[in-house]
Image: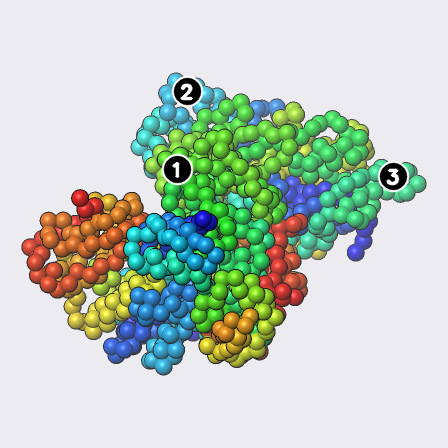
Amino acid sequence: MPKREYTCVACPKGCTVEVEFEGDEIKDITGYNCLKGKDYVEDEFHDPRRILTTTVKIKNAKYPRIPVRTETGVPKDELDCCLDELTEVELEAPVDIGYTVIDDVCSTGISVVTSRSLEEVTVSKLE
Amino acid sequence: MNSNTKSLKKDIVVVGGGPAGMAAGLRGAEEGAEVMIVERDIELGGILNQCIHNGFGVEIYGEELTGPEYAERFTSQIGESTVDVRLNTFVLSMQPDKSMTLLTPNGLLEVEAEAVVLATGARERSRGEIRIPGGRPSGVMPAGTAQELINKKGFLPGKRVFVLGSGDIGLIISRRLTWEGAEVVGVAEIMDYPTGLNRNVVQCLHDYDIPLHLSHTVTDIYGSDRLKGIKLSRVDDGMQPVEGTGKDIDVDLLLLSVGLVPENDFFKETGVTLSEKTRGPIVDEWFQTDVPGIFGCGNSVHIEDLVDWVTMDGFRAGDGAVAYAGNDSLPNPEKEVIAGENINYVVPQKVSGEDPFRFALRVEEPMENVDISIKGTDISFFQRIVTPGEMEVEEVSKDDLAKIKELEEFEFEVKGRN
Amino acid sequence: MSDRYDVIIVGAGIIGTGIARELSRYKLDVGVLEKKPDVGWGTTKANSGIIHAGYDAKPGTVKSSFSAPGNKMYEKWTEVLSVPFKRLGSFVSTEDESQLGKLEKLLEQGEENGVEGLEIITDRRKIEELEPNITKGVEAVLYAPTAGVVAPYKLSIALYENARANGVDFQFNSPVNDITKTSEADGFEFYVEAGGSRYEGDYVINAAGIYSGKIADMVGDDSFSIFPARGEYYLLDSEIEEYVRRINFPLPTEESKGILVTPAAEGSIIFGPNHQPLDKPSVATTQTGLDQVLNGAMKLFPDIDTSKIRTNFAGLRAKAGSDDFVIGESGAARNFINVAGIQSPGLTAAPAISKHVIGILEESGLELSEDPGFDPKREPIPKFAEMDTEEIVSYTDKYEAAKDIVCRCEEVTRAEIEEAIDRGATTLDGIKFRTRSRMGSCQGGFCTPRLIEILADKLGISPKEVTKKGDNSYLLAEETKKGE
């Protein structure tokens, strides 16, 4: 039966947890030392998600980039797609914190929002 | 004094508008003090503005905010407060009597303060400081500088990258570079364990198959104009490179994440006693130094791992500064706090024993199932795992203090169970 | 711009800029060809910065004839050019009383070379008065009060600025790849090919440092070769500059004067150099070499706080086979003057050499007529960090950019950085040597992104085109998010 190893991140200990599986189904989990760890590894096996934090271009602001984030974790496999979609975006200041940059990134149903506000300035240094 | 120089009086001047300074300033203003925050950058927030990843605020907000989001919670509150914020302003000199000269966009300004909070943060250790030999090409820089270039200025400083140091900054920049299309070929750590959070090892390195070389360091730098490569060598138990283990790796960017050092210049200038361990000032439970009315907080006191603790310390220092400026005497910190068994350092380094206090400590060695306790007492805090990479923060309560009134010094120790 | 010069100088180090500035006193067309984008980037920028008293050189050598005289010229030279110079005095120390004889020999040699004020001190109290933190074991020192320290890179920058102000042309990024003798009919002596251009000149001065052997080869002069020898250094934080007061040498060996410990002219402390002959020029430092340097320094100052080490670097000595300076008209080509093999004490000798070369040119027929417009004075870039309140008020009133501190560690304002660029800095290193930004405790961690912006802005180039030190030393690979 195929096996996969995970390093648990539920606490600093970092247990190595081994999952035996068949298709999408977990057959056995070993190596965890607490229930938190078991839950974490089950989630990682079935639906690993990550919050994406990056930047997008912005015009007329004091910086040429503004930080953005996905509101919740997106499927790990969709990260590259999300990054590609965000490369195409260009905002224009002023922008508020929490402004929706893309409301359904890569058809994940998850939106990408700005994580700061940037006021409008007349000359941007690096443009 | 020149007639062109203006002067002002304030109850509290906070130097530095990062998370520590913002918390101290905000608390001061909430308590009714006249507060000025002096910030040399073009905006408040400090290094949070370039830390665009999430993970900030779990301890105090129960949320995983990004750095800029965390900063904006404070900047918006400060905007609505009475705090006099001076951006683009540089402290040129500071006296032990808490008078200072500022260089502002409108010229020089003399300020006299009742109390000063030095929330000046930290700087990154440089290549020269860790003495890596080799050429002097471009393409070798501290990870934080790269972070600023990528996240604020929109530039990638290299395409094929090696990272020295597995602290959180080194791990997070590795993922960030990967997301921006650079290839991170490896991360080296001189210790035999990663010094950053385990979660970051997994989510920043494992996720992208970036190898982590434990017990390794960079021992040579190649290239005369632009970086061409590095030599990676294994180190022995004494952290000395082992001859013959060197391996050349072609990269065009070497990022250094090899530790932070408190920015302690103004502590030195005002005659504050520094700790040899932390390189920040020796402080009491109110974060007051041994120069009355001069306080520190955040990374200028010791290098913290969570911004949440920085904020808490800032509030505490703000409270202390308000009390000092208002002539409410702070209790005399006559009890010494000692770093005992398996402890590298404890902050504060002295306390009055009258007020409950939070303490922060770093252990020397990773251990499991330990008690952090005050020697000779039954005050103790259980921890499943302690590592030097993670600061332990606990609070000694009023009830605890009542039990140990008689002690002249508090010696903390970390001991395994069994 | 004319591509025809009376005198072409190859190399803009301390010797090339020194001669250029000396020639700028006369009504002459002088051109300097430099392979780097700035002055003083070879041997000049990476050495100890010592102005030696002049006792080391063996009497009768070319070195000895220029050392003590050069030393005496330093006050005037640095004053009129506004370059930091401090006559700190030097020590040669020994912990072994039986070595006293060696000190006495140095003293005699010095006196023969015309060095003044030499003295052997064996009184421990007096030694400590002059150098409080030197190792307790020192039994005797040769004290040379006339030795000093200068910032050599600043000196070459000042010479360059003054020469340029007095009409000398400088062509940077112009490595000389060929020199041809012309025929009588051309009316001038040489074609010099450099950086894609061709220059015509009546005289060529070979001041190409470690490459001077190669340049001489181009006119068929194989009378000398240059054997580069690397010297490695540690530089400490200026925070502890008070710890060392004088220039401290151990007893010299055949190879070199040994690992010295000295204050630098602009603050901070220098350890070094060691001595490593190389087949191929390289200024990379090595662990072995740096260990030698540290060990050497610790012998003189065993308690110095080595946690204050800020950086390491290496420089190359341009050592001629004869181990002496090679100064004079080439035997192989008329009007081709070698000023080569200028290793230590070349910096000391530089002002005397510069004057001497004018004499050589005159002897070989160059007509020298003084230019009444010559202005010997060069003003420095104002230094904010050293200003008092009054000065700050007037400086900041005059320049808005003076209220903007870019380098936090050394307190360098944007006004100074912009002025450095106006005066010829085109790279981060160029700004560093002129203003000290990136020389402080963070070594550029904080200010580098801003310096890139300011350079790009002032030079009208993209931030991606900004370099640390020319060539391929770019700092930014590309914009994120497919920016332009």
Q: Residue at x 73, y 47 (%)?
A: C174
Give the amino acid type for the residue marked by disc 2 in the picture.
Gln
Q: Mark 1 sits on what residue?
A: B239
Q: Which of marks 3 and 2 is nearer the N terminus?
A: 2
Q: Residue at x 66, y 62 (%)?
A: C461
> Of the residues tagged 3 and 2, which is closer to the observer?
3
Above or below, B208 relative to B215 = below
> Which label was assigned to residue C99?
2
Give the amino acid type for the residue marked by disc 3 in the picture.
Thr
Q: Indicate left or right for C159 with B287 as reference.
A: right
Rendering quarter of residue A102: bottom right
Residue B62 coordinates in the image, percent (x, y) = 32, 69
Above or below, C352 relative to B140 = above
Q: Which chain carries label 1?
A: B
Crowding near the residue tagged with mark 1, few <14, some 14–19, many ≥20 C-alpha atoms within 10 Å: some
Above or below, C162 relative to B79 = above
> Which label was assigned to residue C182?
3
Q: Indicate left or right for B412 with C82 as reference.
A: left
Query: Can the viewer see residue C335?
Result: yes
Q: Distance between the residues labelled 3 and 2?
A: 57 Å
Helix, strand or loop under label 1: loop
Is residue C465 or residue A86 the one in the foreground? A86
Give the amino acid type for the residue marked by disc 1 in the picture.
Met
Q: Indicate left or right for B404 with A16 as reference.
A: left
